[in-house]
Amino acid sequence: MAARPRFALVVSCLMLALVPAVISPLAAQREVPCVGPLSDAGASPEPTDGAWLDLPEMPRARSELGAAAIDGVILVAGGFDGPSYLDCYDIASGTWAVGADIPLGVHHPGVAALDGVLYVAGGYAESGATDAVWAYDPATDTWAARAPLPTPRGALGLAAVDGRLYAVGGALERLGGPVTGVVEVYDPTTDSWEPIAPLATPREHMAVAAGDGRVYAIGGRANGDEGDQFAAAAEVYDRETNTWTVLPPLPTPRGGFAATFANGQVVTLGGERGTTTFDTVEVFDVASGTWRALPPMPTARHGVAAVSIGDTVHAVAGSTQARTVASTGAHEALTVGPLGG
């Protein structure tokens, strides 16, 4: 599919309140579109492998949310303390802006970007688990409903691979409800979903990421059980064979965390288990099939969002206390080098 050209935003996003200058020299605010013809991401300060960089905090602190990147802008959607919110961070200028509210506020949604469109799928609304799927068009700053998930659920993962969206696992009915291993794939050209092979180990609150044409599902829990069989589980989906393959276990078992793909590696960030909130960062190198640890996040948290732009991973927002809502707007970044680099 041809690359989507950069587009101009028709409706400008509203600016957020000023971020205190002590956070970063980039914190000065200006009116920016959520997504538009922005300069290259390299204009921002560049984190290095082994050193986290503090970036301007997200002014509207939230947790149990999702995020994705489009054209050098990180879009952060939903979550506790602002289930309808959409916030946008311009990498080039280091500024935050506000997009149109999600029509149905949710926490614990699946969030991913595909072909220049941001998708928010499932999650928990006031009435419980929802099947709603929303598509955000940055060119018009508008949301539109898409075909609903066949299986309503929250605490799921959503990942984009080769023109399709993969909705992975989750919990039914309500937060902490019955776990499901169902996996459904969305085709935007037909606006339709179809089931594929379920997870080998059904769970929710796992971290899901896509890279090298595959989908990875790491950690999580099931029906309140945080045992290693769930919290350390790791598997990868092969589209050619429609099968999930078990991978070496996550070294630090946990759930309620995030993952993204950078430099040929699945990067896992934060999480919770029992009363512990993690700052842990562990990466799975796809080529060698091994795990390694990276320096911990400066801010330990669960319910965090992870986004990669190039080889740089951004950890945005989350909750600083396990099993409760203690939302933070913390925004930190780390460049992930190759294994042995």
Image: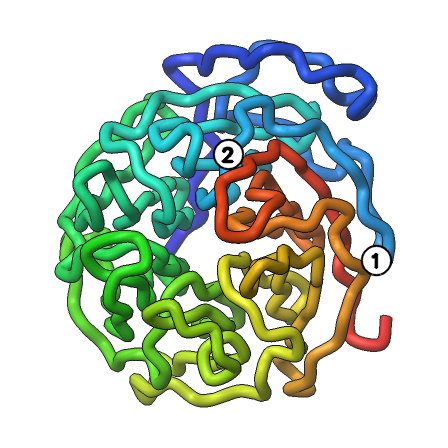
Which residue in the protein does label 1 denote? 49
Seen at 78% across and 65% down, the residue is: 294
Q: Is residue 70 visible?
A: no
Secondary structure type for disc 2: loop
Seen at 35% across and 59% down, the residue is: 156
Query: Relative to 251, is 282 above or below?
Result: above
Seen at 64% across and 61% down, the residue is: 262
Quarter containing the N terminus:
bottom left
Which residue in the protein does label 2 denote? 62
Q: Is residue 326 left or right of residue 77?
A: right
Secondary structure type for disc 1: loop
Residue 287 pos. (x, y %): 65, 83
Residue 175 pos. (x, y %): 30, 53
Residue 215 occupies quadrant: bottom left
Residue 225 pos. (x, y %): 41, 73
Residue 18 pos. (x, y %): 65, 11
Query: Relative to 44, is 140 above or below?
Result: above
Q: Looking at the picture, which amino acid does disc 2 mark?
A: Arg
Q: Residues within 10 Å of mark 2 (few under 14, many from 20)?
A: many
Q: Which mark is residue 31?
A: none
Q: How far apart in space, not on screen, are marks 1 and 2 (Cα)? A: 27 Å
Q: Looking at the picture, which amino acid does disc 1 mark?
A: Asp
Question: Front-most of 238 and 326?
Answer: 326
Q: Reading the chain from its start, which is encountered first: label 1 or label 2?
A: 1
Seen at 78% across and 37% down, the residue is: 54
Query: Relative to 247, is 221 above or below?
Result: above
